Image (tube, coloured by chain):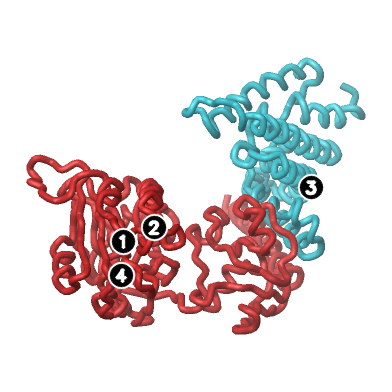
Chain colours: A red, B cyan
Amino acid sequence: MVTTLLVSIGIISLISVFLAILMVVADATIGNYGTVRIHINNGSKELEVEGGQPLLKALNGEGVFIPSACGGRGSCGLCKVQVTEGGGEYLPTELPWISDEEKKQHIRLSCQFKVKSDVSIVIPEELFLVKEFSTVVESIRDLTHDIKEVRLLLKDPAVITPKAGQYIQFEVPEYEDSDESVYRAYSKASSPSDNNHVELEIRLVPNGICTTYVHKHLKEGDSVTINGPYGDFFLRGTENNIIFIAGGSGMAPIKSMLLDMEKKGIKRKATYFFGARSKRDLFLLEEMRALEEKMPNFTFVPALSEPQKEDAWEGEVGLITDVVRRMVEQGPSSEAYLCGSPGMIDACIKVLNEVKVPPENIFYDKFS
Amino acid sequence: MNGSIMPFAIFFASIFTGNILLTNYLGMCSFLSVSKELKTSTGLGVAVIFVMATTTPLNWLVYQYLLIPFGLEYLRFIVFIIVIAAFVQLTEMTIERYSEPLYQSLGIFLPLITVNCAILGVSLFMVIREYTFLTSFLFGLGSGIGWFIAIIAMAGIRQKLKNAKVPPGLEGPGITLIIAGFMAMAFMGFSGMIAIS
């Protein structure tokens, strides 16, 4: 009995060790591509990395973060990078995400494309500013029945330099309802001048991996890893009138922009249309009223689509699109910033076209 | 049946009457998820043919010359899995290094099927049915071809299906499973020709 046991353990170990040695040898010979160079943006930066690994991982290892939601499994299609030299053929695993237009520009899915020889790539300059931050939850408070405000204190690095309106990615560790860590993007709600904090507004989505984690598990004092900032949703430096439109947790980037305007003393005429169903979905009303006091050219217009009797609501009533159509006057000299669900944004863009806001002046951040 | 034609009978039986996918329902996961397009299905199918035709004789050697002499037949599950995983990994690395076009068309699919139950299933059937080395090879090859035929047939049907009205509740895996059922019944039509044992 004991002999059988020992023999079987011995044989299994023998086979495993043999195969393991074979793999190690193969890894060091067949799988060894030496060090390769990555030239970024026509020589503005050059990295030396170990060859044979996916581009996304190679760049991450050197502190250059490409936005990616699935963690490099080729299932989100976000981590696109332009490879100008050394790209080679497309892999079948990339093709579902790459359009014909992108093929002409040699855009690759960086989690699938492996760096086997020297390559040249082009990435947006601002990605150099993207870093990974370890943070601690300073406070969590309820804004409405289903939206929580999470305030993170940055530990390492201790300072973030985003533009107002940009977003960060929040790493959700493994927990009981999710057996792998994932990243989810959230807009930063705090002012850029508050540069050692990040505030997020997170609405509970039924069965959402991250929102469930934040609403049911996250406590004050917990450690959280984020990376960022990302995105081209930020206030442009023009003299146009500003139309802000948001719904639900779409409040976050707009609030950040408003705080930034107040801090910098920007006196452009601004109107903020905030859509909600009933009074229990409204939040931060005092903060907005306080901003109206400090900025004479700013008006906050909350609108309820289904006000309840007990709300005793005297403000605007109707869908946010109707309110915008009714109230916007100088469309052609305005620019619009929209944040909310895809349905809301599409409907609002239609209305903004009707009131003659130039299409190139419409900026939006769609939840997806 | 005469001993010398037996291996070839098994080869054809494993393609048609004993199709690993349609009679044993093994390897369903990749069959359902990768059968959306003909091109990718072909790549995956060829990879399955290759891996089955190579790992089955390889496992036969391991079984005959390592496990039986030490009386360790009961360890075949774990040993077969390790051998398949290591072999596929090595093949993938080699292809990736030395042949770009082959990697494009075949190599990229190899990691997807390392843990495919059909691959392990073929090795285990080979043991239960006490095949010889040659028969094992032909059985592996035939099972691979059978799997290949099944997935490209399914991919062809699913491409046509894109223009068809499918009840909302049946879209995706639902209708695919129903079609797989029909295909299995159609393949049963071959069963009078050759029997596999």
Query: Looking at the image, is mark 3 or mark 4 nearer the viewer?
Result: 4
Q: Residue at x 38, y 49 (%)?
A: A354
Instruction: Name the element at disc 4.
Output: helix
Q: Nearer the viewer, residue A15 or A229?
A: A229
Q: CA distance from mark 2 to mark 3?
A: 65 Å
Task: Say what amino acid the circle numbered 3 marks.
Answer: Thr
Which is more N-terminal, label 4 or label 1? 1
Q: Nearer the viewer, residue A254 or A218?
A: A254
Picture layout, residue B99 above or below residue A294: above
Q: Residue at x 23, y 72 (%)?
A: A138
Q: CA distance from mark 2 to mark 1?
A: 10 Å
Which x, y percent locates residue A293? 14, 71
Question: Any mark on residue A243, and which?
Answer: 1
Kindly give the residue lying farthest to the right in the view shown. B4
The residue where tag 4 is placed is A257
Instruction: Name the element at disc 2.
Output: loop
Horizontal relation, residue A224 to residue A58: left or right: left
The residue where tag 3 is placed is B54
Task: Say what amino acid the circle numbered 2 marks.
Answer: Val
Which is more N-terminal, label 1 or label 2? 1
Question: Any mark on residue A357, and which?
Answer: 2
Instruction: Name the element at disc 3.
Output: helix
Horizontal relation, residue A95 to residue B47: left or right: left
Which is more N-terminal, label 4 or label 2? 4
